[in-house]
Image: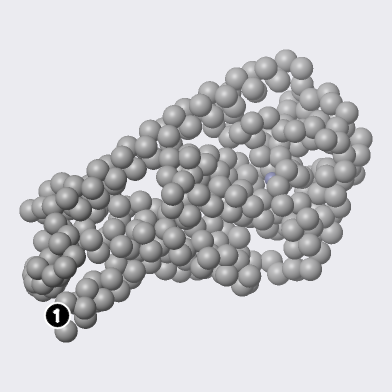
Amino acid sequence: MITALVLVVGVVTTGVAMPAVLSTLSRTSLSPAAHLCMWWSAIASTGLSAVAALLVLLLPGHGGLAAAEWLLASCWAALRSGPLHLDGAAAFAVTALLAVAAVRATTRIGRSLATVRNRSRTLLTMLGPIGEWEQGVLWIDHSDALAFSLGGRAQAVVASTGLRRRLGASEIQAVLDHERSHLVGRHHVQVLIAEALARALPVLPLFRRAPQAIRHLVELAADERAARYNDRTVLRRALLGIASGGHSEVPPGALGAAGTSVEHRLRRLTHDQRQHSRERQIGECTLAIVTGTMLPLLAGSAAALLLFLVSCA
Ligand SMILES: [Zn+2]
């Protein structure tokens, strides 16, 4: 029970406090890719800690941590003999909550992945006959300036003839590179999983706020990658051209070139001229993953220390 309690406290603390921490970090010079790594490592470690807590509760014989467990168990016993009377009922309630959360999250993610895989393929099958393939891009006849990418089984970039009429060749190339970056980075899957987790476990702010943050960050990450091959001024002009080039919505599940955070992206392309090297991004990402993974453990350990101070010190 003690190990599970430490893990659950770590899950709750990280789940509640992490969005504020990540929001503060977004004002630093970390690359969008590193921010994504931080979000996902925090989400993954929170989920894994919850599953670990569930296993410890269901399989008590596997939850022991030798001396530390014994010490905390003694402290826990001291608390139980006091006015709190936390016992089996609490363990049962926590087990039930964790089990329901785990089943809901797994089911939602599985269902969402299956839906988007089929939907993107169906959409491409419908658009194929009315468009023309050219260098891996499906060009469809539409007056608005449209460009979007389809994840899942389709893995395709779709653009409109309106885009060709409104943008120059270099701007079109920048837009297509932005869309290809979404495919390379598996951004559709990231958005999809974040949305499924938010629907399954909206009670935790970390999960509830993930879809908006991930959508924003994948756009910044795609801009960052496109800026490796294109001038930032050209990319900015392209974004402006698409944003003012019509009001058509992109299909559900697709990532449009100018669908999210346009103002922020334009500001960033104008004022932030830093180009993060691939090596620096890998280094930042590794650091972000280690930090994000450690957070639930650190929060849980702090709770264990508090328990020790309250009951045994
Ligand atoms: Zn995009």
Rendered position, 26 above or below 180: below
Q: Is residue 209 shown left or right of residue 261?
A: left
Q: Is residue 148 left or right of residue 24?
A: right
Indicate the position of residue 76 as horizontal and vertical percent values. Answer: 14, 68
Residue 90 x, y percent position in the rendering: 20, 53
Res 133 → quadrant: top right
Name the residue: 78% across, 62% down: 267
**Who's the residue at 28% across and 71% down the image?**
303
Tag 1: amino acid: Cys
Q: Looking at the image, which residue is at 83% across and 43% down?
A: 242
Identify the image quadrant of the C terminus: bottom left
The single residue placed furthest to the bottom in the displayed view is 313
Q: Is residue 191 above or below residue 83?
A: above
At numbered mark 1, what does the secondary structure look like: helix, strand or loop? loop
Which residue, as the protein is rendered here, is positioned at the far front? 83
Residue 251: where, in percent of width, then height? 68, 30
From the image, which quarter does the N terminus lie in?
A: bottom left
The residue beneath circle 1 is: 312
Q: Position of residue 292 (x, y in %)?
A: 42, 64
Give ligand 1's quarter of the image: top right
Q: What residue appears at the point 82 percent right and 55 percent down from the top-left corner? A: 236
